[in-house]
Amino acid sequence: MRHLAAIALLALSTAHADSLYTPASGFRSLFADRRAVAVGDVLHILVTETAQANQTVNNSTQSTTAANLGPGLGKLSFLPLLKYQGDIAAQSKGSASRSETLTARVAVTVVEVTPTGNLKVEGSRQVAVNNDRQLIKLSGEVRPEDVTADNTVPSYKVANATISYTGSDPLKPGKKVGIITRLLHWVF
């Protein structure tokens, strides 16, 4: 009987050593929560940023000057009676208005888990159409409770967010212009 208990104990210990599942392998069940929680996990940030700025400036200045000069004395008697009077007025108005909207979906990677459990994330997305390239870079800190069930976070819930968008300016023409176009611009 003792031999059977020893064999059973030996069989159980070897089964664990030869098991396909090891807790350190990072295995997740098919039924586990798929939200980002560890370094290397991917998370989707839904960027919806809007910025508006309006500025109006009105400025008005006015000044009046007057000067009188009498006839000269002695050798300066040839100077006639001079008078000067003038008004100076200036007025300026200006206004500036700017509105920008950025909407995108950027996949980021968890690069660090802070001691408080927040996820530091970084990522970029580059899109090229013809010769126009747009690059979006995003970094920040996300609370795990802000990650939705579909593994997304709105950009307004990213703390210390740095979002940069670079691309071609739609108001500037392309760099390559034909010789005939250059001549026409030079002549006209």
Image: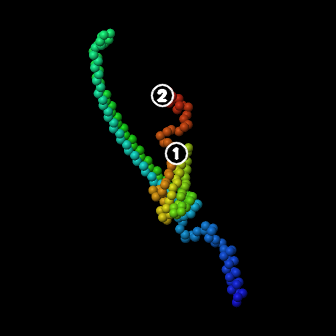
Looking at the picture, does residue 132 appear above or below residue 38? Answer: above
- Point 51% across, 58% down: residue: 141
Mark 2, residue position: 188
In the image: residue 160, left or right of residue 79: right
- Badge 1 density bin: few <14, some 14–19, many ≥20, Cα 10 Å: few
In the image: residue 27, left or right of residue 95: right
- Looking at the rendered image, the disc whose residue lies closer to the viewer, 1 or 2, is 1
- Outermost residue toward the right? 3
- Point 53% across, 49% down: residue: 135
Q: Which mark is residue 167?
A: 1
Disc 1 from disc 2: Cα separation: 31 Å
- Outermost residue toward the front? 74
- Quick one: quadrant of the N terminus? bottom right
Depth check, front residue: 70 or 86: 70
In the image: residue 111, left or right of residue 46: right
**Of pointers 1 and 2, the one earlier in the residue sequence:** 1
Looking at the picture, does residue 167 appear above or below residue 7? Answer: above
Identified by mark 2, the residue type is Phe
- Point 39% across, 43% down: residue: 97
